[in-house]
Image (spheres, rainbow, N blue to C red):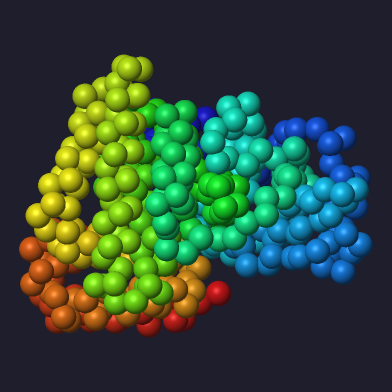
Amino acid sequence: MAGPDLTLDQARQQANLAFTASGTEFAFGDAAALPLPIAQMKALSAGSPGVETLHDGGLTAEVLCLKHAGRRWAVKRARPVCRVRNIEGQTSFLNELQRHAELAGLRLPGVIRPVYGSLRDGLVVSPWISGRHPGVLDERQARTLLETGCALIEHGFFEWDYSAGNLLDDGERIWLYDFGYCYRFDPLTQFNSAGHGCEHPRHHLAERIEGRHLFGALLDAGNDDEALPHFIRFKRLAAQAYVDLADRLARRGATPPVLGHYRGLAARWHQELAHAPGLLYLASAWQAHSSDLDDDLRGRSCTPRTLQRAQWLQATLGAQGHRLRRSGALSPDDAALDDTALLRRYHDREVEARRCQL
């Protein structure tokens, strides 16, 4: 049983590891709603009748597109061993099933609703959504993604992984379908699900979207000057989303620190977008790339994108070290080093990322 001094992360990890070790089944939905019997679903391969595509790039699972009786289905099957090599990866499929079971009755905008999921069978089956993974977010994409993220927060779900592979754009809105790294928290008293919920305010919805997706996509959009207008558009939409979110949470009795958190970020962004958008871009980009590099190194799940991030960090430090320090983007550990030592640190991280590429 989780003790009172455990953090939210520790309590969740302890409970999920114990549940996994127990061999107990966790399932939701109705197996009778599946297009095929469970045994056949588990045995599907790329060459099976009705299987149109196989997406094998996921770290936790593979996804098949199955056409049966005129309908298309997404059949997600857990890998025997998650490619994210830490506790969060080890328990991510169970966590995803838990979140889908809790989200099923809420019908939140942009959240896919599976018809069935099972830990024992390693399956999550949902209607197929025809779409594409987004690149740089346009206004429609950003608005709908922020809408979904805010809806999750309001109902006590903090999604950490807004990477492109977890997002689908059907031409009208962006959909979320992977909740392996979505954790519970109290949105009226806490900022997120890290620690005890209040000591890591730097992690929030817009920061997660920027870190896991937007700034990665902007690496393909050209240089920083070309990327800046895309960033400004997103940040303005995020600021308004936070104002509206705070108003809704206030009506439910959220604490002053929580309301001040969202309103304070929105006010600061409005001010900086008006007077120093380039410096805000620089700080946000540094935080996004350094945070995502750290995430990939911890999970031993580095990709070519990880290397691009490490290279951007080194190039930017070499060219704009003074502006970076002035922006306040550096962590206390980074800020304590001079530019030469800091450049060496990120060079070493790039070398490490090359060693642990998937």
Q: Residue at x 60, y 52 (%)?
A: 170
Locate residue 112 relative to residue 28 in the image: left or right.
left
Q: Nearer the viewer, residue 232 or 294?
A: 232
Determine whether, in the image, residue 211 is placed left or right of residue 123. Answer: left
Residue shown at 41% from the left, 36% from the top: 150
**Residue 92 showing in the rendered view:** no
Residue 184 spot, x, y in % from top left: 47, 34
Report whether residue 340 is seen. Answer: yes
Considering depth in this image, is 220 or 260 the residue closer to the camera?
220
Relative vertical location of residue 42 with respect to residue 308 in this rendering, above or below:
above
Percent x, y of residue 156: 45, 30
Kindly identify the residue that appears in the image at 29 percent across and 81 percent down. 347
Quarter containing the C terminus? bottom right
Tell me where residue 118 sits by quadrant: top right
So how many labels did they put on this image?
0
Decide: is 25 above or below 58.
above
Task: Please give left or right for residue 331 compared with residue 240 in the image.
Answer: left
The answer to whether residue 301 is left or right of residue 50 is left
Estimate the x, y position of residue 191 in percent, counting from the top left.
32, 36
Give the x, y percent position of residue 284.
Answer: 25, 59
State the image quarter where residue 319 is shown: bottom left
Q: Residue at x 32, y 61 (%)?
A: 230
Residue sitting nearer the eye, 146 or 185: 146
